[in-house]
Image (tube, helix red, strand yellow):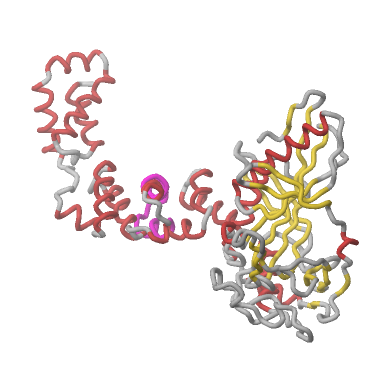
Amino acid sequence: MAKTIQGESAVWEMVIGLEVHAQITSQAKLFSGASTAFGAEPNSQVSFVDAGMPGMLPVLNEYCVEQAVKTGLGINSAINNVSVFSRKNYFYPDLPTGYQITQFEHPIVGEGAIEIDLPDGQVKTIGITRLHLEQDAGKSIHDMHPTKSYIDLNRAGCALMEIVSEPDIRGAEEAVAYLSKLRMILRYLETCDGNMDEGSMRADVNLSLRKVGETKFGTRCEIKNVNSLKAVQQAIEYEALRQLEILENGGTIDQETRLWDPVKMETRSMRSKEEAHDYRYFPCPDLLPLEIEQAWVDGIKATLPELPDEKKARFVKDFGLSEYDAGVLTADTTNASFFEEVVATAGDGKGAANWVINELFGRLKKDDRDIADSPISPARLGQIVALIKKGDISGKIGKDVFEIAYTQDRDPEEIVETEGMKQVTDTGAIETAVDEVIAANPDQVEKAKQNPKLAGWFVGQVMKATGGKANPKAVNEIVAAKLGL
């Protein structure tokens, strides 16, 4: 959706900030040793701490702290050497203790920034306000019984990073670009798997409208727990138009929390928006302030992997790729690793990118497969690119080799040899084929001499006569010479 909306009385712009809840990749929860594995039987991964049993004390998981620090470094944010856990008090059936252990005034990660790539080619910086650690609540299930709700506490106590952006986002496209980039970084860092469909990454969308040219923010509404990129875009587009209609008709926006209904494709009111004082935050009496040494932070920083922006720049520089192709290949760590393995065998960065993006990705999409399940290995795809580069096969024959290697699990070099697919580079044999085509088509010869563009017809006939095995470059050169072009 556009950054601005034309109303009857004014032009309005969206002001959006996102609060992303990312579940930390860890085998144990934030304050207990219970498992975090997805898909387990309901209430089978719940410790006494998670269940809020009296007298149970939380014990902080150091690995989760390390993952939060790593994420903070990956989003170019300040790491706070001292942070404090607080209790956020509210009552809900899937929160057994009646409070959530979180961080309020003193988070573990402070201000930072992420650069996003927009569809028009521009790069925009989105500010990060903070990242704080907190425990997740359980899950309420309302569709298993006509009059009862069920509670699953498997998720209760799982470690979350809440990553809060500045209100720098203008429109649905920017919101999707920001979420995509953040998820990409988390996956590169291996601090969150980013699987929104499993609930391990969820977004709260804060949106308000203001007239273009104004600097004061309008009254915002928060859309809770949106769990897909598509839903984020749809929710923003709907909510912006809902607020526009109210404002254009002289009404005022009520600050509230809303839910996105993907069936009715609308947001609906959930509750009036709480303020911090409604939660009665206070430091958690069971946990001391978290103090981390700078040397430990520096050690984590030294182990950071190559992040998406760095890898993209390297692919452009080292392999001569376009910004677009490099962006496609670095959008996912698995794609990037696969491509680099192809290059290692092929010795041709541009050729490898072309075959990975166009042939492999296209075929995998058609077969509804993931690249991790690709029937053709990076080494074998690299062999095909290398055979084309050496001139042993043409690009057209390469597609036939790819099809056989993909469907029959065969080695490309073996396919070329046993199937007689090797490209004809013998200029004598090609010259003979050209002579035969010219002799058989005298009328076309005269036309081609008058219009050199028609020489392509002869090239096509020679390629057809040789079963596509003739070297196209050699065919073009010999045809031109024979026709005196």
The residue under the point 32% across, 58% down is 376
The residue under the point 22% across, 26% down is 480
Horizontal and vertical percent position of residue 350: 41, 47
Q: Quadrant of residue 471?
A: top left
Q: Quadrant of residue 76?
A: bottom right
**Is 98 inside the magenta-drawn segment?**
no
On the picture, is 344 further left or further right than 481? right
**Is 349 inside the magenta-drawn segment?**
yes
Could you say which is closer to the camera, residue 326 or residue 392? 326
The residue under the point 69% across, 75% down is 30
Of the 4 image quadrants, the one containing the C terminus is top left
Residue 415 visible within the image: yes
What is the magenta segment's predominant secondary structure? Answer: helix
Residue extending farthest bottom: 55
Of the 4 image quadrants, the one containing the N terminus is top right
- Residue 284 vertical position relative to residue 456 in the rendered view, above or below: below
Horizontal and vertical percent position of residue 92: 76, 66
On the picture, is 396 further left or further right than 296? left
The stretch in magenta equals: 339-361
Residue 350 visible within the image: no
Could you say which is closer to the camera, residue 151 or residue 282? 151
- Residue 44 vertical position relative to residue 317 in the rendered view, above or below: below
Could you say which is closer to the camera, residue 172 or residue 127? 172
